Amino acid sequence: MFKMWNSDSGSAVVNGNGDKTVKSNNAAAAGTAEGSENKASDIRPAATPKRTNMILKGSKLTGDINITSDLELSGDVDGNIRSFQDSNIVLKGNCKGNIETKDGSVTIEGSLEGGNIIAGKEVRITGKFNGGEIKAKNKIYIDGEFSGKLEAGEIEIGSRASGKGELRYREFISIARGAKVNVQVSQSQQEAKPVDKPREKETAETGPDSAIKS
């Protein structure tokens, strides 16, 4: 069932059913002969920062891009951007194609034309999305221009958002006052998990007339 919502009438809310640790004992200052002791086993190495690839403004690329780390794109791409890992993709330039990251998030500050977005975590749009469909496992946040179908666990439409399309949520949706949208809203059902039915035990009936054959 679809619900028509025009934000000019107000707002709507719909709810669905690393560090280092060093220990030392320094007794020299107190005049003792025990000395100082640093326990190397208590030192934890700092986590290596995740690398981010950058495509600078003014760059123009044609063809698909496959990445294994984070990507910040300020140039123009005519092609698809894809990651089969937890890469986070930030688009500050322009892209004509699809954007997909298996376990990461996608941020659109520039524009995406004629493509789809699939994200294992979240999608955030403050720029422009004029494509087909956005699917996010967790949340979609829109505070820019959009046109197309949005589907996620949570959908939040900010006050500066404008656009039209279909909003399909599983758990929660909100449309802020001031947003200029013409959308169809529907709730998708949670994916049902199959339940194994316990197997009935076969029992043999016995009685006074029963005979046991050997």
Image: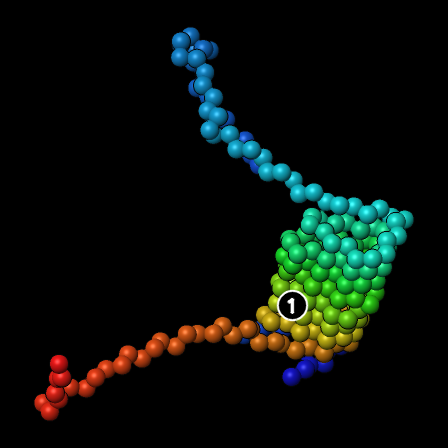
Q: Write down the quadrant of residue 177 in the picture.
A: bottom right
Where residue 94 sits in the image (x, y, percent)?
85, 57
Kindly identify the residue that appears in the image at 45 percent across and 16 percent down: 36
**Amino acid type at mark 1:** Ala
| Tag 1 secondary structure | strand
Relative horizontal placement of residue 138, taking residue 67 as reference (left or right): left
Neighbour class for label 1 at 10 Å: few (<14), some, many (≥20)? many
Q: Quadrant of the C terminus?
A: bottom left
**Structure colour scheme:** rainbow
Where is residue 11, by image quadrant? bottom right
Q: Is residue 123 visible?
A: no
Residue pointed to by mark 1:
152
| Image position of 98 (left or right of 12) | right
Q: Quadrant of the N terminus?
A: bottom right
Q: Which residue extends farthest right? A: 58
Q: Image point 74% across, 54% down: which residue?
A: 66
Is 209 located above or below residue 191 in the figure? below
